[in-house]
Image (tube, grey):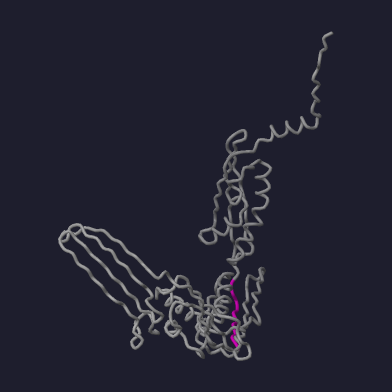
Amino acid sequence: MSTLHYNHRARPPASTLLSLLAVLLATPALGAVSVEVRGVEDEQIRANVLTYLSFERYKDSDDLSPEFVERLQERSEREVSLALRPFGYYEPKVTTEVRRSGSGNEQNYHVVVTVVPGRPVIVDKVEVKVTGAGSTDRHFTDITNDLPIQPGDRLNHSSYEALKGGLLRAAATYGYLDSRMVTNEMRVDPVARVAEVTIEFETGSQYKFGATTIRQDAIDESLARRFMRYHEGDPFNATELLRTQFALDDSLYFSTVEVLPEERDRENLTVPIGIDAEPNRRHRYQYGVGYGTDTQVRGTIAWEDRRINYAGHRFRTEIRAAACSLMREVCRVASNSAHPGPATARA
């Protein structure tokens, strides 16, 4: 007797079918967003407005549904208001219009943001006081004698930050490593449209260069020290560390160089310096081919030994050949300890 076999496949639940249908129907809304800002002439302020606007950040989003665009429009007034504050405008009037074009899932939106900045906040008073051992140091007096923010200026938060940053950078660069801001306040009265700036900066004592430790094995340490652009006991100056690093780099004895301050001695007010350098490749080869009307085809082969010994002596040989002549040139370059060259002489 033959037997019939049936394959029974379970039907997917109704919830699964509905989910699949929702996925098929939920096609992302495609399109583009363009943003136009009116009423702001200053390019710096306009750029800041665009930075704050969610419309600008999400204009390349895959989801540009009408609901999503409406949420972005609701945010725009608050975002523009926050963008204008750093430039002294605390009570702007902002309107946003969204113009839609296209059909179906391809909707394009042109966003017009109209800004009336209103009257700006004006700086009414600026008090900057530098105290401590560096109060008469020209690196600080140059700042206090030419403040980036003055009474009568339109309030600009970046000018206030530039003033604070200038004092802090001067302290870090020129050895006032225990400096601190005692007071830094910017008080703004949006109703009266005035602002007051108060800064008190304590420099502390100035540190000096301490001992320098050099870690390298390419040349004699006495030669390496001739590249230093500072002396132990000099007032600390971070720019001299950079000059020292450049000089060591330019010597061609080293492939990498680091010149860094180490943990400062608060009791003796000194900053020890550490120099770490890796030797450069000892041998260097050069090849060149050219053509000249007097020599016709010519070529050059050169070989240089950058470190014959720890005294820093070098040797270079160069062979030049041309169709019309043959010349061999040998030269020896030595660092003369009695008469240091430009690379080692302290400037």
- Residue at x 54%, y 88% (from the top left corner): 208
User: In the shown orientation, is residue 78 left or right of residue 308?
Assistant: right
In the image, farthest residue toward the front = 309
- 105 falls in the magenta region: no
- 126 falls in the magenta region: yes
Pick the front one: 315 or 341: 315
Pick the front one: 217 or 277: 217
- Quadrant hosting residue 131: bottom right
Magenta stretch: helix, strand or loop mostly: strand
Q: Is residue 245 above or below residue 68?
A: below
Image quadrant containing the N terminus: top right
In this rendering, the count of numbered labels is 0
- Residue at x 69%, y 32% (from the top left corner): 24
User: In the shown orientation, is residue 294 left or right of residue 150?
Assistant: left
- Quadrant hosting residue 185: bottom right
- Residue at x 46%, y 76% (from the top left corner): 245
In the image, farthest residue toward the right = 1
Pick the front one: 243 or 22: 243
Which region shows up in magenta? 122-131
